[in-house]
Amino acid sequence: MFRHTMLFLGYELGNVRRNPVWPLFGILQPVLYLLLFAPLLTGMVPGGTLVDALRIFTPGAMMMIALFGSLFTGFSMINETRNGVLERLAVSQAWRPAIILGRVMKDMLVLVLQALLVMGVAVLMGLRLPLPALGLMLLLMAATGLFAASLSYGLALAIRDENGMSQLVQFFALPLTLLAGMMLPVSLGPEWLQTAARFNPLYYSVEAGRSLFAGDLSDGTVPVAFGVFLVLGALSLAWSVRSLRKLAG
Amino acid sequence: MIIEAHGLRKTFTARRGRGKTEEVEAVRGIDLSVGEGEIFAVLGPNGAGKTTTVRMLATFTAPTSGTARVAGHDVVKEAAKVRERIGYVSQAGGVDDNAPGRESLLLSARLSGLSRSQAHTRADELLETFSLTEIADRPVRSLSGGQKRRFALAIGLVNRPPLVFLDEPTTGLDPQNRANLWDEVRSLRDQGTSVLLTTHYLDEADALCDRLVIVDHGLIVAEGTPEELKKEVAGDVVTLRLDDLAAAGELLNAQPYIKETRPEDDCLRAYLDDGEHNLPALLRALEAGGLAIRSISLDRATLDDVFLRHTGRSLRDAA
């Protein structure tokens, strides 16, 4: 089982290696936000320097890749429900969950690499982070990716239509972005907004990211975020594997 | 027997508009037995249930009822064991468009249990067999339909299965590629591999298979070797175009050498043995009956005539 997961992971990473342009495109948006939006925040944050702004804004920008990258990754699988690839794999000797697991692990790795690049840009702009915070942040990105990618594959297998999936993901992307406080912390907003944010899983990762970037590694938001994403990740993974089994009708 | 199926049925629940569902019987009770080393064809028009039948036998879809043993194992209870022993090439092919064909081949080889070096050896072997070595490292989307189909076939054979399922293997191929694929299927049989293929081409079933079943509306309507089936409808067929089909049919049915007649669109098909010798008598009979012939042709009976006899319509119209 583990062997098959690694085989699928290796195959998927081979595809990424042959065509590395798309993951690079994926970080363009957060990098632009860092370069062109973070400077606008300098007047609003305590401390008032660019570094202070980056400390608050970078975790949100990184979660954008998780949202706009990993949540769209399932699109590739919609085509595979039609072109016979999944059909062939389903009657091969492959351990079925490995078909999804290998892809999700690829997405997690790509996400971590993208996150490293975005953090690199933040460092070039003057942000300094202790290594443990950086390591935990990357793990948090991986956990977020586990959830977003599995959810995306589950949606792809359930909807099996590019138009429908695109509408649905687009529809949720903006409210999820705003209610996670990716741009500005939700704590600046009124009570009802803060309550609504609690129903958005990404809110927890952005909050935990900010705690990590503030050097507050033992903050309660960190274990909560990991817990939320491991549970949701496991659930959505189970759902997408189940949907794969239903493919045959 | 490498395949033995009894009473296979598959019912799908299809959505018809808002909240309404409808039961669709794709396969309504199919019995099959395929011997080892045979090329066996399932012939029928689109929508006859061919693909669903193959999918059930290849463990992709579970039958609603009925049982099947494939390569010695039950397709539902021992699906994993069946999967070790079959190759399956779906109608869509199932080759990843974005990666080079060699990568898909290597992945399949490793999934079937080969080590890295064994997988490379097996992949090179198959690439050689199907003349794909030169294009093995190009993305599959840049290849032609025939090349893609050869990759699909190579991937299906990676685990050296004793039985291969080919669902509509030549649909969409040009005549040259079609003939090449036929040769490849025949060479599979020469190596002792059993093949079950589906097709809606009569000439394909006729030229390629040892035995076949004809399916229509989810049921088998005829079974046998191509020769046996054609013999059922007499060796030759005379196709006549004339004005009064009913009168001509009545007249010809009374002739001793005519086995049966069937009206089809604006012509009449008369089945008889030894057509070359009986044709003059047939012409004289029509002339004596005062029936004017607009055109006439004499052909060997084909599987289409078998299909027509069992279903009342031509496969060309049904497809």
Image (cartoon, rainbow, N blue to C red):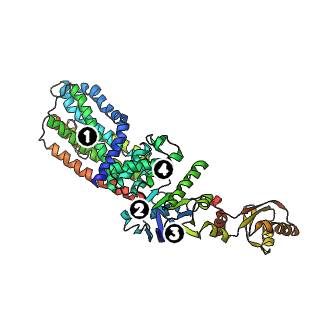
For label 1, the residue is A180
Left or right of residue B239, residue A249 in this image: left
Write down the chain letter for disc 3.
B
Which label was assigned to residue B85? 2
Q: Earlier in the sequence, mark 4 or mark 2?
A: 2
- The answer to which image quadrant residue B266 occupies is bottom right
Query: Which three-letter amino acid code belongs to the residue tagged 4?
Result: Thr
Label 3 Cα crowd, 10 Å radius (few <14 / some 14-19 / many 20+): some
Q: Residue A15: horizontal and vertical position, in percent? A: 37, 41
Q: Are marks 4 and 3 on the same chain?
A: yes
Query: Which three-letter amino acid code belongs to the residue tagged 2?
Result: Arg
Which label was assigned to residue B121? none
Q: Which label lies toward us, 1 or 4?
A: 4
For label 4, the residue is B129
Query: Which three-letter amino acid code belongs to the residue tagged 1?
Result: Ala
Q: Are marks 4 and 2 in contact (CB under 8 Å)?
A: no
Name the residue at 24% across, 41% down: A141
Q: What secondary structure is found at the residue carrying circle 2? A: loop
* Separation (CA) of disc 1 from disc 4: 56 Å
* Separation (CA) of disc 3 from disc 2: 27 Å
Q: Residue B244: horizontal and vertical position, in percent? A: 81, 65
* Separation (CA) of disc 1 from disc 2: 51 Å
Q: Which label lies toward us, 4 or 3?
A: 4
Query: Which three-letter amino acid code belongs to the residue tagged 3?
Result: Arg
Residue A21 is at least partly visible in this image:
yes
Q: Are marks 1 and 2 on the same chain?
A: no
Q: Earlier in the sequence, mark 3 or mark 2?
A: 3
Write down the chain letter for disc 2.
B
Which label was assigned to residue B28? 3
Label 1 Cα crowd, 10 Å radius (few <14 / some 14-19 / many 20+): many
